[in-house]
Amino acid sequence: MGAYSTRDSSYGGTSPMALYSYLTLTGLGLVGLYMLLTGSGEQFNVGEFIMSISPHQWSLMGIALCVGLSVAGAAWGIFITGASLVGAGVHAPRIVTKNLISIIFCEVVAIYGLIMAIVFSAKLKDVQDATITSSEMYYKGFALFWAGLTTGLCNLVCGVSVGITGSSAALADAQDGQLFVKVLVIEIFGSIVGLFGLIVGLLVSGKVA
């Protein structure tokens, strides 16, 4: 009885996420089967769909993902670190001031994304309708999209990593002040992940005139 009570009883023991995934895959499978049986399978053309989107739209999506994911990573890290810092600071007020450096590390992640978005935006320029669908313009659009996505994802992971490490640093410092510097070194290595994304973003977008 005890083992049964700990099991998620919603949806017959199936988590909502698994149920949504199952329904999504089932729906896509039915649509694909319908298109196959009705002789319209060639309409499912991923390449045509990608090429139907304007290169400027790809560039703007990359810039938006760069800023959005970076800010989300910073906010997530601040949330994790701040909650532990406030809780541990109640019992050990001495840790609050020096552990603010973890909050700064998380905020730097958002600054990385903002800087890269400015760099990417500087590469956008107005073009005529006749040349917007050229191969050169598609290259620029795809390059800025993947550069922005790579930078944003790296900053998202970096923010979470710094947040978790900063939370551990605050809790460790509350117990023993000598542990702060040791955990801070680990936190610095975690923050370097954001720099990796920034460098890759610059390399990918470097050939975009």
Image (cartoon, rainbow, N blue to C red):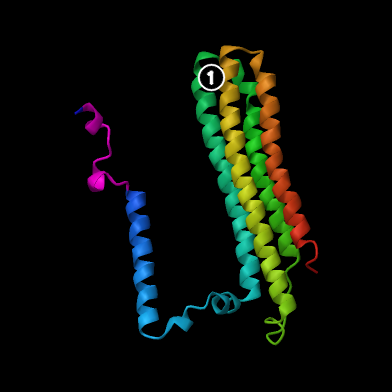
- Magenta span includes 45: no
The answer to whether residue 80 is above or below residue 17 is: above
Q: Assign a secondary structure to mark 1.
A: helix
Instruction: Give the residue drawn at x 63%, y 28%.
Output: 100
Total numbered badges shown on the rendered structure? 1
The answer to whether residue 22 is above or below residue 1 is: below
- Other-residue count near label 1 (Cα within 10 Å), few / some / many at <14 / 14–19 / ≥20: some
The residue indicated by pointer 1 is 89
> Which one is nearer the viewer's eye here, 106 or 37?
37
> Which one is nearer the viewer's eye here, 67 or 1?
1
The answer to whether residue 53 is above or below residue 39 is: above
> Which one is nearer the viewer's eye here, 30 or 15?
30
Locate residue 183, reporting x and y percent: 65, 23
What are the residue bounds of the magenta stretch? 2-15
- Magenta span includes 9: yes
Amino acid at the residue labelled 1: Gly
Q: Is residue 126 visible?
A: no
Q: Quadrant of residue 6?
A: top left
Quadrant, the N terminus: top left
Instruction: Give the residue drawn at x 60%, y 59%.
Output: 64
Locate residue 98, reporting x and y percent: 66, 22
Locate residue 127, reporting x and y percent: 72, 80
Left or right: where 26 falls relative to 198: left
Locate residue 47, reporting x and y percent: 57, 76
The answer to whether residue 81 is above or below residue 143 is: above
Farthest residue, direction left: 1
Q: Is residue 1 visible?
A: yes
Instruction: Give the residue drawn at x 72%, y 46%.
Output: 196
Instruction: Give the residue drawn at x 60%, y 18%.
Output: 95
